[in-house]
Amino acid sequence: MPAVAKSFEMEINTMAHNFSSTQNNKKPNVDEVKAYLIGLQQTICERLEALDGKAQFQVDSWQREEGGGGGASRVLTAGGIFEQAGVNFSHVTGDAMPASATAHRPELAGRSFEAMGVSLVIHPKNPYIPTTHANVRFFIAEKEGADPVWWFGGGFDLTPYYPFEEDVIGWHQAAHDICQPFGDEAYPKYKKWCDDYFFLPHRNETRGVGGLFFDDLNEAGFEQSFAFMQAVGSGFIDAYEPIVTRNKDLEYQDEERQFQLYRRGRYVEFNLVYDRGTLFGLQTGGRTESILMSMPPLVRWEYGFTPEPDSPEAELYEVYLKPQDWLAKAN
């Protein structure tokens, strides 16, 4: 095992200690979470710049016009590998929750809130490199005379256009290894949640090949819940980098490029119709440019598209856009 991977494995094993223990009532350390998230944004951007080898991230710091807080959006465009990559840190506060949140969580009514996180989407130019998304986040709502309501959420998922089984199995193996120190039930639970969440009902298909998704995480207490969020956040780039490295030099034609642009439309449809983070950001007066930086720079729709039988495009629909046990295929 490479030294970096072994070091990370030791780190998440340490963080996972007593993850399944009884509730830890330690008050959430908001400053500790924020410091981790700012460092995570920096680390991921440095790794992506090294992978790309051409472009660098432009930093756009901003303050929230309504309410409080702000953030820093980092966007890389027209790179050697990445057509666009956005890595956003935000920390917003407010005196009241939006209606969509209190409808889902009525106990949040009448509370002030803080929400912070790192969210990223990477759109490579080469159709043989998958698009990917990741985010980790923390939320806390408080009011005088009551205990705070808080939780962690996040995950990562992969959206290939011309998938390779090796890549998909490796992606899920990395997700499994991140979860394993936190209990045998963690990976299957959060894998299924990801499959269910990134599903487009109006298309009757998944957005991609899944990964991990978790939310409302607080049962193990602050320290262990925070440890799991860190394991997911820090493990993302180690899962994605090998896929980019293997596929970045594969040659493609305009036909593959056009199919990539067509499938990017599914990304737009999901983010604007179903994604909770997009809805929360817009309803709480977040910065629109930062919220919508996840959109691909180029995309197209085609009426009534049907892939040719027995084509690589058909294989995507028939094999890969269906939830399944990818780790079983590794044996």
Image: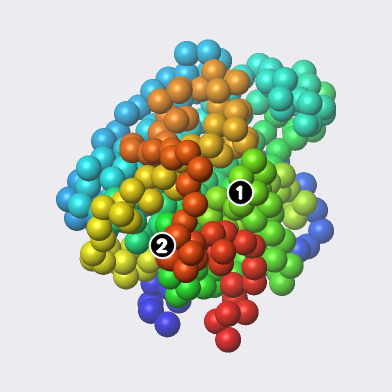
Q: Name the quadrant of the C terminus.
A: bottom right
Q: Amino acid at mark 2?
A: Tyr
CA distance separating discs 1 and 2: 18 Å
Residue 132 vs 86, above or below: the answer is below
Mark 1 falls on what kind of element? loop
Residue at 64% of width from left, 62% of height from top? 323
Q: Nearer the viewer, residue 275 or 35?
A: 275
Q: Nearer the viewer, mark 1 or mark 2?
A: 2
Residue at 20% of width from left, 52% of height from top? 80
Whichever of labels 1 and 2 marks the residue nearer the N terminus, that label is 2
Q: Name the quadrant of the N terminus.
A: bottom left
Residue 133 vs 3, above or below: the answer is above
Residue 29: which numbered mark, if any? none
- Judged from this view, the residue extending furthest toward the bottom is 331
- Circle 2 packing at 10 Å, graded few (<14), some (14-19), many (20+), is some
Residue at 82% of width from left, 27% of height from top? 106
Residue 198: which numbered mark, if any? 1
Mark 2 falls on what kind of element? loop
Q: Pinpoint residue 301: horizontal percent, then vertical percent.
A: 43, 38
> Which residue was labeled with disc 2?
162
Give the left or right position of residue 270, taking residue 220 as reference: left
Q: Amino acid at mark 1?
A: Phe
Give the left or right position of residue 40, taking residue 67 as reference: left
- Judged from this view, the residue extending furthest toward the left is 54
- Circle 1 packing at 10 Å, graded few (<14), some (14-19), many (20+), is many
Residue 306 vs 19, above or below: the answer is above
Residue 250 occupies which quadrant of the picture?
bottom left
Give the left or right position of residue 298, taking residue 141 as reference: left
